[in-house]
Amino acid sequence: MKRSIFPLLLVWAALAVSLTSCVTDKCEQEFTFYSYEPVYMSMAELRQMVGSETPREIKSSGKIYVKDHYVFVAEPNQGIHVIDNLDPANPQIISFINVPGIRDVAVKGPIMYVDSYLDLVAIDISNPLAVQEVNRDENVFPYGSWHNGLWADPNLGIAVDWIEEKITEVQDCSGGGGFNGRNVFLDFNANVSALASNSELATDPGLSGGEFNAGIGGSMARFTLSGNYLYIVTDTDLLPYDVTFLDQPVARQPVQIGWDIETIFPFKGDLLIGSRSGMFIYSLDDPAAPQQLASVSHMRSCDPVVAEGDYAYVTLRGGTPCGGFTNQLDVVNISSPRNAFVQRTFAMDGPYGLGIRNGTLFVCDGESGLKVYDATDPLDVGNNMIAHFKNINTYDVIPLHNVLLMIGSDGLYQYDYSDLSDIYQLSVISFATE
C-alpha cells in the first residue's frame, strides 16, 4: 500500500519521541508507526530501460503535454502514455514510453525531453510507436528529490519503490530507544498506550531547433521551451539547455533562484517561475543566462502561474507540504515586469493548476472541481464564473483552440468551450482503479 507522505511527519515523529518523559527510573512507551524500506535498482539497469511498449491503462495523474495531435501523460515514475487526439471526442491511447523516474516532459519537433530520476533524457519520437533514446545528460537532478522526504542510500542505487510495514514497538522513555535512522511515520490513529512499571505517564546534427515548433505544457510544469532553449527548474535552480540541435542538448550555467521552486511558464520573452513563497520574473534577453527582473512575495503555499496580456494569475494552495493555509487566486499586474505586484485576490477552496486563453481562465480547484471564469476584466475575474464542473478532483489544464484538456485524479477530460454559454464534456479517458 502506498501513502501520501509529508516530510513534516518526520518532525512530528521525532518530537513525539523526544518529548516523552517519565517520572520513574523505569518507563516504556508503545509506539505504532509505519516503516518504509527502499527498493533499489542500479543506475546502469535504469539507463537501459527507455523504450516503447504496448499501450496500457493510466493508473495515476501526472503532468500533461500537447504536441500536434498527440497528448502525452507522464505517469509519475513509470513513463509516458501517448494519446492520439486527432478526434478529441474519441482519443486513443496508442503506446507507452517506459521512462523510470519521470516527472516532467517537453517536446520540440521530433525530440522529447524528460527527466529520469537523476538524468535528463532526449528521446526521438518521430515514430511514437517505436521511440529511441538519442541523448542522456547524467546526474543533472539532485538525488532523492522524488523521495517525498524519505531517505535512501545513493551508494546502493536508486530507490524505485518503498516497502511499507506497520510496526508496534515498546521503547524506553529514558532515551535508550529511538528509530535508529529508519524512515518511520507515527500512526496517530493508533491507540498509543503507556506501559510503566511503577507509575502512570502524562544523434542527427541536422535537427536544427529553429525549424520546429514546441508543444504546450500545463501550469504545473517544471520543463518549458522558449526559442532554442529548454528551461528546467529544480527545487533551487534554473537550468538552461541550448537545444539548437534538438538531439544534442547543451547545458549552460545554472542560475540559482532560491528555495522551494515549483513551476515555470514562458511569457513574452520572459520566464514566470512559481515558488512556495512567491513568483519570480526572469528576462530571456540573454537566453543562455536568464536574469531576474522582479519577485512578488506571497504567503507560503503551492504556486503555479500563467499569464495573458498585462496580468499573471497565480493559485495559492495551503494545508499541504508547501506550508501555509492560504487558498486563493492572485491577480498580479505585470504590465511593468520590474514592478510587478499583486493587484487583486479571490478566495478558492484548494486550487492546483490553471490555464488562460483569449480572456477565459480555467482553474482546477482541487476537490471543488473545474471552474471557468470570464477574465476580460482581470481585476474582477473571481466574480465572473462562467461554468463550474463539480464532482471532479482536478489537477491541471491545457486550453487549446476551443478544446480544454483537464487531468484529474480519476481521468483525462476534454471539453468543448467554443460556446462559453454551453461548455460541455467531449470525452474522458478514465484511469485504472486498483
Image (spheres, helix red, strand yellow):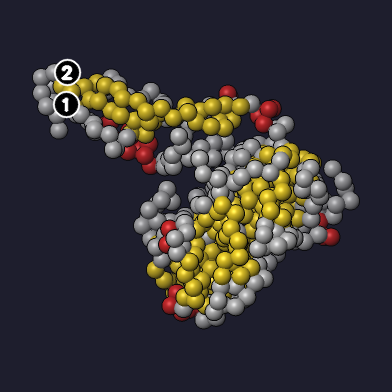
Query: Which residue position is annotated with label 2?
Result: 26
Tag 2 and tag 1, C-beta contact below 8 Å = yes
Q: CA distance from mark 2 to mark 1?
A: 8 Å
In the rendered view, would you say 330 is above or below 375?
A: above
Side of 240 where 411 appears, left or right: left
Side of 159 where 288 appears, left or right: right
Residue at 34% across / 30% down in the picture? 33
Residue 405, by quadrant, is bottom right
Residue 281 visible in the picture: no
- Give the residue at the far bottom of this rendering: 377
Return the mark for residue 22.
1
Q: Residues within 10 Å of mark 1 (few under 14, many from 20)?
A: some
- Percent x, y of residue 157: 60, 27
In the rendered view, would you say 143 is above or below 430?
A: above
Residue 328, by quadrant, is bottom left
The residue closer to the viewer here, 168 or 42, is: 168
- Percent x, y of residue 60: 54, 46
Residue at 38% across / 53% down in the picture? 319
In the rendered view, would you say 75 is above or below 47?
A: below
Q: Secondary structure beneath disc 2?
A: loop
Residue 158, by quadrant, is top right
Side of 200 where 88 appears, left or right: right
